[in-house]
């Protein structure tokens, strides 16, 4: 019985860890650079941001609609690192978010804001669409249709 419990516990831990990971901006940059023909839709959000939470299902729908295409939806939480285990991971699990979720692990907010986009005020929700040909940054809440159209019009 004890072995069964340990196996179950390790599977649960793996599942939770797979749901949200810490991310440095350099790691994100490398992933985009190595993406070849992939278009990345990177949403910056937080569990305490009502407009962010409201638009998350739209990103999940976009992810599902593009499963067989070179499109990756990444959700990057700007919650404090200390909130990862107690708030972000439970939020992801409770809301059945299947997109890749990360928590940005950068100490200097102003520095990472400017690296993502020089015109970004730091307000969220914010979304970056990026591929080899284009980089578009939006500081706004997206509807499902707006997400779809923005992705289609990315050149």
Image (tube, rainbow, N blue to C red):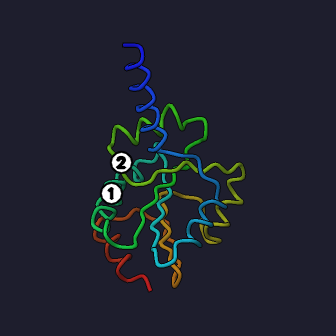
The residue where tag 2 is placed is 97
Question: Looking at the figure, which quarter contains the C terminus?
Answer: bottom left
Question: Looking at the figure, which quarter contains the N terminus?
Answer: top left
The residue where tag 1 is placed is 60
* Of callouts 2 and 1, the N-terminal one: 1
Count of labels in the image: 2
Q: Residue at x 46, y 44 (%)?
A: 18
Residue 85, image x, y percentages: 52, 33
19 sits left or right of 62 in the view: right
Viewer-closest of 8 and 74: 8
Between the C-alphas of marks 2 and 1, the distance is: 7 Å
Q: Is residue 78 above or below residue 32?
A: above
Residue 135, image x, y percentages: 53, 78
Q: Is residue 118 above or below residue 16?
A: below
Q: Are marks 2 and 1 in contact (CB under 8 Å)?
A: yes
Q: Which mark is residue 107?
A: none
Q: Is residue 8 above or below residue 136?
A: above
Q: Quadrant of residue 146?
A: bottom left
Q: Quadrant of residue 92?
A: top left
Q: Residue at x 67, y 51 (%)?
A: 106
Residue 115, image x, y percentages: 67, 66
Residue 116, image x, y percentages: 61, 66
SS class, disc 2: loop
Q: Residue at x 31, y 72 (%)?
A: 148
């Amino acid at each position: 019985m004890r072995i069964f419990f340990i196996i179950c516990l390790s599977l649960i831990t793996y599942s939770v860890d797979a749901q949200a990971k810490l991310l440095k901006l350099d790691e994100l940059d490398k992933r985009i650079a190595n993406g070849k023909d992939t278009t990345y839709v990177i949403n910056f959000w937080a569990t305490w941001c009502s407009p962010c939470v409201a638009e998350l299902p739209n990103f999940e729908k976009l992810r599902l609609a593009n499963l067989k295409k070179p499109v990756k939806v990444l959700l990057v939480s700007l919650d404090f690192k200390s909130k990862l285990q107690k708030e972000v991971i439970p939020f992801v699990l409770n809301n059945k978010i299947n997109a890749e979720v990360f928590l940005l692990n950068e100490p200097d907010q102003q520095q990472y804001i400017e690296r993502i986009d020089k015109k970004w005020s730091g307000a969220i929700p914010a979304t970056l669409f990026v591929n080899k040909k284009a980089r578009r940054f939006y500081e706004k809440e997206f509807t499902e249709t707006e997400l779809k159209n923005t992705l289609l019009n990315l050149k």
